[in-house]
């Protein structure tokens, strides 16, 4: 039985940096309409994340996204 893609789509948070400095600023991008596979399998620029970005963590769910915001001390915008 195939799973419906609508049920699998929940909030996906991606923490990344765009700098190669020793202490770069971490940024977060939250996608509400994509799955993890769609984000990680793409070879093109995802809106909001540049190609040169260094991806640190990928999580699924609002609770884990809030944990990442506090872990990396990212200001919510």
Image: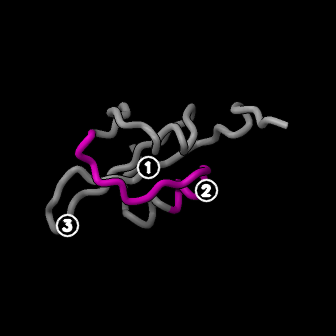
Q: Earlier in the sequence, mark 2 or mark 1?
A: 1
Quadrant where the C terminus sits is top left
Residue drawn at x 57%, y 31% is: 33
Magenta range is 51-67
Q: How many C-alpha atoms fall within 10 Å of the one at disc 3: few (<14), some, or many (≥20)?
A: few
Residue 38 at x, y = what percent? 51, 37
Where is mark 2, residue-wise? 63
Residue 55 at x, y = what percent? 35, 54
Residue drawn at x 47%, y 40% is: 39
Is 53 a magenta residue?
A: yes
Residue 66 at x, y = what percent? 53, 56
Q: Earlier in the sequence, mark 3 or mark 2?
A: 3
Q: Is residue 16 left or right of residue 65?
A: left
Where is mark 3, residue-wise? 23
**From the viewer's perspective, is residue 25 above or below residue 30?**
below
Given the current orientation, which residue lies at the most extreme right position? 1
Q: Are dots 2 and 1 in contact, CB under 8 Å?
A: no
Residue drawn at x 85%, y 37% is: 1
């Amino acid at each position: 039985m195939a799973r419906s893609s609508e049920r699998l789509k929940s909030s996906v948070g991606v923490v990344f940096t765009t700098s190669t400095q020793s202490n770069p600023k971490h940024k977060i991008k939250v996608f509400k309409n994509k799955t993890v596979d769609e984000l990680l399998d793409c070879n093109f620029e995802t809106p909001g994340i540049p190609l040169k970005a260094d991806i640190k963590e990928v999580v699924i769910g609002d609770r884990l996204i809030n944990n990442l915001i506090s872990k990396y001390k990212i200001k919510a915008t």
